[in-house]
Structures are given as structure tokens and as C-alpha cells.
Image (cartoon, coloured by chain):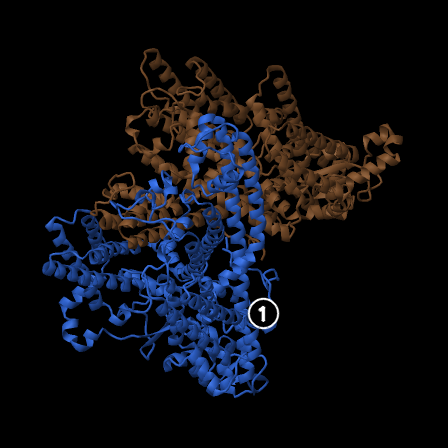
Chain colours: A brown, B blue
């Protein structure tokens, strides 16, 4: 699907070229996929406004969550309500699409499969809703088949670029996976044939007294389950009891199919994932470069022998593109772009503007603590100074680490003893004192800076715990009754508090960084999983709804012990009390699918169509999506690991540092270590930081810690494109294939 | 452990430097870790003779397999017999070690930890044996603890270089794995604490009516098992039945611990494996280069301005190093080394000698079919020619593919119908005819060439099946009784025959190649697994011997249904009829350990010490060794994949081809496709192959198909060392660390 690529992720301003066209008053240019009237710019801004984006996501999830309220419902609502909400959602989607059509040239809009998909999905949903409604009036029950279509909105709206990329990656992997899968199936069929010949006529019985390995198709299914290890010793035991030698058959089977083939699946998926990822990153990097060159061409004026962009125009552009930037920040950017103060910016510097805007330069006013301004005498008094130096002391962190450990022991002890429940108040007080002391010592705005993950984490956890504990105590004293929900939350919050101790140990911090960096992209996989789960849950509900029922313990309903299904009498399913694992509503379906993802015990559900359904789910979810997830974690780890050793630094960052306006991150870190900050965050600026320039402003590059793998890979790749290289044209970029040669050697591999 | 590195694997002659020293009559040189007397050379040859090596392996495995005959025995033998055999084995090991000491300089020998290990192991074994024997005479039962020491012999004899490397790799990975493991344990403990707080006071019960989540340590164990997914829905069901919201706790747990942490383990292991592998390969490549330079320095003579090795000496050296090489092969090598026929070899060419000897150049006499010589008239007759062209026709392969498919259907059908059991004879006849026809058409010596995997496979399978079938029929007609063992073998052979169809499809062949290439190194992992299994099996037997007993069905013994252990009454273990999964002898222990490796159901065994034992085994086997195995398969796949795209060819192979003496592989392959050979093997030479040189000899490089990953990586690395580069000295090589910079950029990554 050739996307119009409104802008390379991660987040260079998507409208820089548009803004340049606007500034230059240029006529509509066939290379620019945007219209350039002031109204178009306004519409474009509106389209990209965060409220609009958030609203779109809200309606997408509202539409998806309708499955909770439609029959079979978790919380039943009348059909009229759900259908009105659905029509509303569809109208919103249509409006959003129309808006997008207005800011996109017509030929680009209609060429884009995404938009067609959304339109078709809206039409299908409306048709299905109408048919279902009419049939309902005449009391004919039919299937709401269009519900499967709903995840399409999640995939195809422009905001979900990451999910689309993951789907593209899967599509590209399919051919290779298919061959391995066929070979795997061949091996499975061969082993099953052997099993049939070896065990079929022995009259063996399983532990439940059922015939063992008599029917070819059942053998295939049993051995497929063995590949997932879910029925591991059980399937072997009858043959093993008959003769120990038969264990060899199963050992050979497990080695070939579970270990070798499953690893091969991972290898194929990982290899394709990596290839595809690199290609996407390369496209994005080239696209960015190309757009910047186009923008330069729109704004350029002749100056001596070369073309340049004049300062006034440049400022106009930056104001338009990044209206929130402060004056001083803009001056910094200009200073970097035009480092010889010539009053104009040459092509080479101009092309870097997107990156320049992308670097999260934090404007740090070297401001003193507000208390220092309001009550200077008290704040500078000997006691106060001592207090602050104490908080900065290494021992302060250690003391609190010890307190956390003691707290852990108290949590593990029994809650009922009054002595211990009072201790909880003491700990809560200690944690609150810690936060207050830190805010007293460090500048509060720096302490609650954007990237201060652990500070935010601490504060939120502790104040939530405080609120919940107070609420619970109030409830208890007034109603003599513990609210279970609140208590549960209090328990969880108390334990979560203990996590902080991990951040005190350097080695763990590196691993934690990787894990925190992975979170944003994990959300992509969350989206992917959501799509697959939704589709399978809706199919599953249609197929298996009501087949299994859950009765609370001590129920007198007939067949309560067999989950309301006499066919399950004496089955492992009923004996294991799995009755609540059913497809009776959307939420249960999700939990069953989660259990199927984890794989174990899924063979115990015994309907025949269920087997095919479960195999299909296993192939899609475990063989493909979980492997992509693992590939992603592997790649993220390797990128982090290679970065840990060799810091990739763009030319711009070097320049910021050369200009002396940036504070080098490592320096800051060292200082912080000296100052015994409890977190490794670089954004906390003590009073005695780097020498500030005369203005009292320090710009610095935002923390390295919370970058995405994408951004890191893109930086690595960009470091390889020479600044002079203009890169391929728009069309060439869109058609880049994963196998096309990379301009220079790839270096996203770790360098060891 | 700095090894004296008798020579770089894969298999350059380990004694080239020794031979050079011998040829040059040089005095003992401190750079050469060998003595150079004729007797030393003889001893060295003897030490490396294949009979000596095989014998050593035989005694190692004999020593290991003693566990089968010692108490608790699978096949009991008197203590006297096993102890005599053990002493014999120890004597052989001592002899082998003494032999090694004779061919190694004393200081090198004593510096080598391997040798010390072996000596200590021998001493320990003897001491233990003596103590045990004496105590036995006085009827005191003691533990044969030294049996754990036995795998040391497998690891430490010089032949097991691959296993040692795998162990080194594990040791290097340990520190990093430990940190991730600690973090993982921390997460596990936190979640367990939450679980205790959330569920501990609810009075919930498991499906078996046992208390649920009351005791902290039991929760930790249950959740550890959940990480392995073995008790996946069961552990969740009571909480889930109580409130659906509690499912969220388990979902969070599975995502964090099963998916993220387990992937992180794989990432750490893979990353270290790759790093370590590269370092080892680099060491080997440098070592080879260094040795060749030393050898050159021993043999060099002055010739004009440069030092060279004269032809006579060179030939003497090659004869000594590779006595089996044919004269014409030696001439070829000389021709390549001295391509201007100057009568001497310069340093640059000499250094390549090891690689040159390593290339499996196959001497192909363009000989006509023996039948063509013996009965030329008949062989060249029209019928014969038609027959042969028929066999070469594409349709011949297709016909047999169809026959195999029909055969598969017949196998799946019931055996008892007499019609179908006759069909078996027809198929057997058809397969035999196929082989005979092929031997008739192609030159038999080429057909049964060294690398003709599929031809050998076919022929062996079919003749084994023929023998077994005839044997079975004879037995049946004489004793009216089917021998079950023979029938089983016949069944397996019949099914194995069907595998051949995979090789007919090009895409499957690529995957099969990877799999076949992996086999040799998989044996290394087999060795590794054997060591771990041996140690754990011996410990397991000491701990759990006799705790569980297996009684055949319908046994009247007391507690037969509870595996002879009243404590197991009503347990899942007894109900699942797992009684044969016990530690009562070496073989059962192995099978139990295999089941534990596959992970499922291992928590059902309920003794307390068993839990710790199983956790330890899980950490060693699943977290470390299985991950290394997966890493290895990933790496092998990536190397294969990158080779598929860009062929790495050494300078020497290019030279062979330039000289026109080699037949280019691809050309051959094309011809074969034209000739419709049924296998993709390149070694089958039809009558009309490439134009032969006048001598009627064609040298060609042996098939690409069966190379090891090691060899491929080594080639890739060597392609990067410039021919002029002498590389570091012996000491530097031995101390190379994995983090040292590689001379040029690494390219063992796939190039995309």
C-alpha cells in the first residue's frame, strides 16, 4: 500500500513541507501532496490536532467495546442503544475520512488502500446493522457478521501507523513462513503415520480409559498439541508403559518438531522482521531528506554563488511549524543552523531542520528554588542547608532502600495484627516525608520534569496509596466494612512501591531501561493482539456461545459439575473446573484466548470444530504474532546493547555541544552521581550544574533513556547517509524493496 | 583456559607446523608447542590416528553407560564386573593422557586445566571406588558420589573441542544472565507478594480441594511454574471463579514474566553466544595464519630478493601432512600455489596451504560407466540408450513422486487386508528397480559419492526394509508369529521412505539444507545435554530412588494405583498414570529429565526436595541450554540465509576456477537441471559434463551443502583478513577478549 507518508515517524513535524509551501506562496506543486491555501493549512492543523486524534481513538475503542454490550453481553444494553452508538461511531469515522480527503490531493487520497478499506468497512457495517435491525423487527435471529470488520478502523486510521507496519511485516513474512510451515506439517504427518503404525493396533488406553492412537486425524491433533508441549507426558505415557523403547519415538518427535521447527519459525520471523524494519526505516529517512530538499527548493533565494534560505523566511517557517517553541529556543536553532551569523541558512544546514526540531532541547532556566526566592532567609539558614545536603547525601538513598526492604517484610507478615497495620501508616508517612524533602531540596519543576519517570512513579503510587488508605479507613470506621476493591488496590500499590529498589542498582537499571524503552512499541503489539483477539473472540462467540456454562460453587442447576453440558461428563475440562473458560461473552472470550496464547491445556476442550478453531488461533497467534513479539524484544535488546557501547550521536547534537550551549549528558550524570541523586535522570538540575551562559539559560538534549527503538535505528541509518546525498525521489522511495542494496553498509547490527 | 590449540577447527591438518619443523630439521623452537624428533612425529600421528580417537570415545561412553549396570540398574551386573570395567576405563584415560603428555612440551601440558581436570577426575574416581568397595565388604552402604565426575572425561578430552566451547560460552554468559535472572526473581517475588495479599485470605480452594495461595513459598513455586506455562489455566481458575477481574493479575504476570523475561533470557544468551562465537572464530583464524607463517619461516630459503619455499620441500611437506592425497591432486595444489611455474612458492601462496588442503577437491575421472566398458555393445544399444534417457527425464522423477504419494496412502490404510500387504511388495520392487535403473544410468562410484546424502539414504532405507520384510515373512511362515521389533522397524522404514519427496521441491530443499547443516553441531548440543542429564540423573537417583514405583496394569501389589507410595493417593500424578516417570534407574531418569526439559506437568510431582531439584534443572536446562540451542539455530539460519544471497568465495576457490581445472558448481547444477537429476547434488557427473581437460581428470570443489556453520563463519572472517596481514602473535591470540576490536568491520551479519 503506497502511503502518502505525511511524515516520517518518529515525529518530525509532519507539515514542514506544507508550511514551507505556505511560506513561499508557491503554487501547488506536483511533488507536494498537499494543497497550500491558508484554509488548507488551517484544516491540516485541525486534522492533526491532538484533540481530534484522541477523539478518533476514543470512537475506535468505543466501537470495539460495543461487543461488551451487544448480545451475548457482559453488560446487556438494548439493541437500540448499541445501534445508535454504532451509527454515531460510523458517522465520526466518515467525518474524519472526509476531513482527511480535504487535506489530501484527490489522486493521492483515492490511491490509498487505507481510505478505501475504511469506506468499505463503514458501508458493510451500516448494511449489516440495517439488515439485522429489520430481521429483528420480524423476530428472525441472524448473525451480526460485520462485527469482525470493526478492527479495520483501528488498523486503517492514519494514526495507527505502527500497527499497519506490523501487519505489513507479517504479510511480508507469510511466504517464507508458509514453506517452513508446510515442511513442519509434512513432518507432523509423517510422525503421525509412524505413530499409527506403531501404536494403532496395540489396544492401548489413555489414563482416562479412552482408546489411544487409533484414528489418524486424532493422532495428528494429539501430536500437534505435543508440539506446543501442552500434553507432554500424558500423550506418551500409554506407549511408554507398554515399552520403554517407545519413549524414543516421542523424544525424536519433540526434538524435531518442538525444538528445531519452532526455532526455525522464530528464525524466519526474526530475519524478516529485521529486514523489513530496516527497509521501513530507510524509507522514512529518505522521505524526510527528500521533503526537506523540496522545502528548501521552495524557499531558496540566490545569495552569491549558492542558493540559501534567508533568516526571516526561516524564522517564519519555524514559527509556523512549531508555534510552541520559545524565542530563545528558536534563537538557539538559528545559531546552530547559521553558525557563522551570515543572516542566511545554506542547504546543508536547512536539511537538518527537521532533526533539529526533533531534538528535545530542554530550556533550563538556572532558577533558584522558589522557596529560596520567597523566604530566602529561612531557605538559606544553616538548618535548611544541612537538611538539603543530607537529602543529597548517598546515605539518604541507602536509608530509604533499607526502609523499603523492611516494608517488604512487613507486607509479607500478617495484616491482622494491629501493630503491623499501624506500621503501614508509619511507612506511608516516611515515603511522604521523602518526597517532600526532595521537593524541598531540588527545584520542583525539575523534579517533576517530563522525563522524570521514577519521581512521577513514586509520587503517584504514594499519593494513590494515601488516598485509598484514608478512604478505606473512613469506610471501615463508618460502615464497619472493608471495601474489597479499595483494599485490593491498596495492596497492589504497596507492593508496587517496592519496585523502586531496583532502580538503585546500576546493573538492573540498564535492563530496566531496555524494558522501559520497549513499552511504546509493546503498545503496538497490544494493538495487534487486540485486533487478532477481537476477530477470534467474535468468531468464537458465534461458534461456541452457550456450549459451556459457569455455575457458582454449590449450584443446584442440572449438570452444574459438567459446565451445563452433559457431553463434558467426566472430562478433564469439567474435572479441572474450567467451566468459566467459555465463549459466552466478549470478556470471557478474551480470557480464553489469552489462555490459548499461553498454550497450556488448550487440548482439553473437546468439541470437534473447536479443534480447528484452536489450531487456527495457535498458528496466527503463537507461531506468527508471539514470534514477532519475541523478535522485537531481541532486536530492541541488541540495539540497546550496541548503543550502550558506542554512542551514536548526530552531527547536530555535536554542534549543540560544541556551541557550549548544551550541557553534555555524561557530565551531568557524573555530577549527579556526586550529588547522590537517587535516580539516574539527567534532567534534574541542581544549583551547581554546568557553568551557565550569561543569559541564565541552559539548553540540553533530553534524556537518552526513553527513546524508542525506531528512533534509534533511524538515527543509526541517518548517520550513514552523507549530508550531501539527496537520496532517491518520492516515487523511488515508496517503491524501495527490502532486497534493494543499501547505499552504504548497514550498521544497525551491533558492532562486535 | 588457555588451550594449546593443537589446530584450528574445522580440520586444517593439526600437524602442519610440526611437519614443517620435521621437514626443515629445525631445532626445537619455543614458538612451536611440539617436539620434532622422528619419534615425536610418529607418536603424534599415533595420537591423532582415528582408531585411537574412536577408542577413546568408546571408553568414555562405556564409562558413562556404567550407570546402566550399577545399582540402581536397568540391567544389573555384579559390582565386581562394573568396577573392573571402570578401572579399565580409568587406565585407558590415564594412558591417553600420558600419550598426550609425550607429544606436548611439559610446560604447555601442565598449564592446561583440561589435563589437570582429567587427572583429578581419575584420582577421585579411584578413591571413591576403593572406599565404596571396602565399605561394601563390611556391608556398609555408601553413595557412589564420584559418578557425577564421569562427564568430565567427555568434556575434557581434546577431541571434544566443540563441547568445551559450548561450556565456555555458557560460562561467559553467566554474569549477564545472572543479572536478568535476579531481576526476574525480584519480579516473581513481587507478584507472589501481591498474590498473597490479594488471594491469601479468601479461603479459596483449588480444583482438588486444596487450599489456594495461602503460603508465600508455595505461591512463589506456583507462579514460577506458571512462568513455564505448565499450570497455566489451573493456577488461575480459583481466583478467576471468584472474580473475573483477578484474571488481569495473571495476564499481567504472564506478559511480564513469561513473555518479556523469557525473551530477555533468549536475547542475552543469543547476544553472548554470537559475541563469543565470533571471538572463537577469530582466534582460530589468527591461529591458523600464525602457524602457517611459523611453518614458512622454518622452511624458507632465499631466492633473489625474497624468501620462498622450494618445490621439493613443499612436496615433502604435503606428502607428510596429507599422505592420502593423490599425485594429481598434489600437482593441482602445486599448480595453484606456484601459478607461474617458477619452481618455488612465495610466502603469500604458502600461507594458504592449510586452506588449500582443506578444500575438498574431488578428483573426478571422466570415466564411462563400467558396463559401457564391459559390455559396450549392449550398453550403447538403442534400448539401453532409450532406457537411460528415460531415467534422466524429468518425468522419471515425477513418476516416482507419484508412486511415493500412492504408497503413503497405502501405508495409512489398514495393514490386515491381504491385497494391501501384497501392495507393499510391489512398492518395494518399484523402489529397488528405481535404484537399479539409476545405477545403470549414472556412474556407480559417482552415484554413491561421499556427499550423495539422498542416494545413500534411499538405498539404505530400501535395502534395510527389504531385509526386514524378508526376515519378517520368513519368521511368520516358520513360526506363525510376527516379531514385533522387526515389524516396528519395517513400519518406520516405510514411512521414512516418504521423506524423499521433500527433496523434490526446491523451496523445501533450502530449508532441508539448513537442517542438514545443523546436524553436526547439534551433536555438540547432544553432548552438552548428555553431560547435564548425566549429572542430574545421578543426583536424582540418589535423592528419589524407589520413591515411586511402576506396577504393570492389573497388578495386585499394595498401592499399585498410587505408584507404591501412599502419599500420592488421589494426586494428579497417580491419576495421570505417571508412575513410570521415576528415578529408579538411569534410563527412566533420562526420560523424566526429557519430560522436564519439555516442561509440561513437571509440577505434579509433589515431594518438597523435588521442587528445588526441578527448579535447578529448569534453570540450567531450559533457561540456559535450550536458549543456547535456539541461539545456535537462529545463527545457523542467518548465516545460511546470508550465504544464499551473497556467496562467500575464498581467493583459492576463485583460483581453482580460473585455472579451468575446477568445474563451476553452478554450471554443473544447471546441467543437472537439464539432465533432470532427481537430486540437487553436484557430484553426479553425467557422461556429457563439462569439457574435461586432456588428462581426463576434473577437480571440483565438493558440495556446498554439508558445510558447518563454523566453517562458514571462519571463511567469512578470513575473507576479511588481508593476505599480507600476519596477525597477532600466539600469546596475543590466546588472550584475545571478546570485546577487543575486530581488525575490520564484522560481516558475519547478513548483508541486507
**Count of residue discs:** 1
Residue A734 in view, yes or no: no
For the residue pair B237 and B253, the one nearer the viewer reads as B237
Task: Name which quarter of the figure residue A499 lies in.
Answer: top right
User: What residue occupies the far front of the structure in this picture?
Assistant: B138
Subunit of label 1: B
Give the residue at x 67% y 37%: A454
Residue B30 in view, yes or no: yes
For the residue pair A577 and A124, the one nearer the viewer reads as A577
Q: Quadrant of the N terminus of chain B?
A: bottom right
Task: Name which quarter of the figure residue A676 lies in.
Answer: top right
Give the residue at x 52% y 76%: B351
Horizontal and vertical percent for residue B215? 52, 36
Q: Residues within 10 Å of mark 1 (few under 14, many from 20)?
A: some
For the residue pair B422 and A226, the one nearer the viewer reads as A226
Horizontal and vertical percent for residue A731? 51, 42
For the residue pair A238 and B424, the one nearer the viewer reads as A238
Give the residue at x 87% y 30%: A378
**Secondary structure under badge 1?**
helix
Horizontal and vertical percent for residue A544? 34, 27
Horizontal and vertical percent for residue A513? 62, 43
* Left/right of residue A560 with respect to residue A649 in the rendered view: left
- Residue annotated with mark 1: B733
* Left/right of residue A297 with respect to residue A99 in the rendered view: right
Figure check: B655 above or below A364 = below
* Left/right of residue A38 with respect to residue B198 in the rendered view: right
Amino acid at each position: 500500500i503506497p502511503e502518502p507518508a505525511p511524515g516520517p515517524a518518529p515525529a518530525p513535524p509532519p507539515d514542514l513541507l506544507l508550511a514551507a509551501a505556505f511560506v513561499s506562496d508557491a503554487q501547488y506543486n506536483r511533488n507536494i501532496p498537499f494543497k497550500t491555501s491558508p484554509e488548507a493549512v488551517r484544516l491540516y492543523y485541525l486534522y492533526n490536532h491532538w484533540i481530534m486524534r484522541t477523539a478518533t481513538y476514543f470512537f475506535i475503542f468505543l466501537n470495539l467495546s460495543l461487543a461488551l454490550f451487544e448480545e451475548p453481553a457482559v453488560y446487556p444494553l438494548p439493541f437500540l442503544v448499541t445501534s445508535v452508538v454504532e451509527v454515531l461511531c460510523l458517522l465520526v469515522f466518515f467525518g474524519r475520512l472526509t476531513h482527511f480527503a480535504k487535506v489530501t490531493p484527490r489522486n493521492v487520497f483515492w490511491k490509498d488502500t487505507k481510505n478505501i478499506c475504511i469506506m468499505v468497512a463503514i458501508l458493510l457495517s451500516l448494511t449489516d446493522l440495517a439488515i439485522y435491525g429489520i430481521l429483528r423487527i420480524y423476530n428472525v435471529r441472524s448473525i451480526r457478521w460485520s462485527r469482525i470488520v470493526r478492527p479495520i478502523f483501528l488498523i486503517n486510521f492514519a494514526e495507527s501507523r505502527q500497527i499497519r507496519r506490523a501487519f505489513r511485516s507479517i504479510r511480508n513474512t507469510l511466504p517464507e513462513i508458509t514453506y517452513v510451515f508446510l515442511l513442519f506439517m509434512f513432518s507432523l504427518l509423517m510422525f503421525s503415520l509412524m505413530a499409527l503404525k506403531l501404536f494403532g493396533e496395540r489396544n492401548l488406553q489413555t489414563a482416562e480409559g479412552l482408546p489411544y492412537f487409533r484414528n489418524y486425524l486424532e493422532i495428528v491433533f494429539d501430536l500437534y498439541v505435543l508440539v506446543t508441549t501442552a500434553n507432554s507426558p500424558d500423550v506418551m505415557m500409554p506407549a511408554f508403559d507398554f515399552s520403554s523403547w517407545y519413549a524414543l519415538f516421542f523424544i525424536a518427535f519433540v526434538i524435531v518438531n518442538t525444538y528445531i521447527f519452532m526455532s526455525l519459525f522464530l528464525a524466519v520471523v526474526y530475519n524478516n522482521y529485521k529486514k523489513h524494519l530496516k527497509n521501513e526505516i530507510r524509507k522514512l529517512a529518505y522521505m524526510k531528506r527528500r521533503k526537506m530538499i523540496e522545502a528548501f527548493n521552495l524557499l531558496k533565494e540566490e545569495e552569491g554563488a549558492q542558493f540559501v534560505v534567508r533568516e526571516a523566511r526561516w524564522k517564519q517557517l519555524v514559527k509556523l511549524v512549531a508555534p510552541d517553541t520559545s524565542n530563545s529556543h528558536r534563537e538557539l536553532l538559528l545559531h546552530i543552523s547559521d553558525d557563522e551569523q551570515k543572516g542566511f541558512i545554506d542547504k546543508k544546514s536547512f536539511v537538518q531542520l527537521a532533526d533539529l526540531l526533533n531534538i528535545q532541547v530542554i530550556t533550563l532556566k538556572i532558577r533558584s528554588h522558589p522557596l529560596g526566592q520567597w523566604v530566602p532567609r529561612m531557605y538559606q539558614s544553616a538548618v535548611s542547608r544541612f537538611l538539603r545536603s543530607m537529602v543529597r547525601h548517598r546515605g539518604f538513598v541507602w536509608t530509604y532502600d533499607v526502609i523499603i526492604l523492611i516494608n517488604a517484610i512487613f507486607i509479607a507478615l500478617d495484616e491482622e495484627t494491629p501493630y503491623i497495620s499501624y506500621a503501614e501508616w508509619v511507612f506511608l508517612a516516611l515515603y511522604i516525608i521523602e518526597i517532600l524533602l526532595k521537593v524541598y531540596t531540588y527545584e520542583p519543576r525539575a523534579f517533576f520534569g517530563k522525563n522524570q519517570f521514577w519521581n512521577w512513579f513514586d509520587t503517584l503510587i504514594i499519593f494513590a496509596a494515601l488516598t485509598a488508605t484514608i478512604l478505606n479507613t473512613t469506610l471501615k470506621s463508618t460502615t464497619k466494612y472493608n471495601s474489597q476493591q479499595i483494599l485490593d488496590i491498596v495492596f497492589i500499590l504497596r507492593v508496587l512501591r517496592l519496585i523502586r529498589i531496583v532502580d538503585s542498582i546500576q546493573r538492573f537499571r540498564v535492563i530496566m531501561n531496555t524494558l522501559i524503552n520497549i513499552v511504546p512499541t509493546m503498545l503496538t503489539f497490544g494493538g495487534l493482539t487486540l485486533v487478532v483477539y477481537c476477530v477470534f473472540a467474535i468468531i468464537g462467540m458465534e461458534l461456541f456461545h452457550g456450549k459451556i456454562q459457569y455455575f457458582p460453587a454449590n449450584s443446584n442447576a442440572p449438570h452444574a459439575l459438567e459446565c451445563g453440558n452433559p457431553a463434558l461428563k467426566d472430562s478433564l475440562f469439567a474435572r479441572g473446573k474450567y467451566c468459566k473458560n467459555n465463549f459466552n461473552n466478549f470478556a470471557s472470550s478474551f480470557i480464553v484466548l489469552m489462555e490459548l496464547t499461553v498454550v497450556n491445556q488448550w487440548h482439553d476442550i473437546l468439541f470437534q470444530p473447536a479443534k480447528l478453531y484452536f489450531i487456527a488461533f495457535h498458528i496466527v497467534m503463537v507461531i506468527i504474532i508471539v514470534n514477532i513479539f519475541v523478535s522485537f524484544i531481541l532486536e530492541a535488546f541488541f540495539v540497546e546493547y550496541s548503543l550502550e557501547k558506542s554512542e551514536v550521536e548526530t552531527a547536530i547534537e555535536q554542534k549543540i555541544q560544541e556551541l557550549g550551549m548544551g550541557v553534555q549528558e555524561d557530565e551531568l550524570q557524573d555530577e549527579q552521581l556526586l550529588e547522590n541523586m537517587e535516580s539516574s535522570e539527567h534532567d534534574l538540575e541542581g544549583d551547581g550544574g554546568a557553568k551557565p551562559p550569561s543569559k541564565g539559560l541552559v539548553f540540553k538534549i533530553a534524556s537518552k533513556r526513553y527513546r524508542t527503538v525506531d528512533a534509534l535505528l533511524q538515527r543509526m541509518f541517518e548517520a550513514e547517509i552523507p549530508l550531501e546525498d539527496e537520496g532517491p525521489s518520492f516515487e523511488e522511495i515508496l517503491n524501495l524493496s527490502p532486497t534493494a542494496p543499501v547505499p552504504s553498509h548497514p550498521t544497525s547490527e551491533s558492532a562486535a
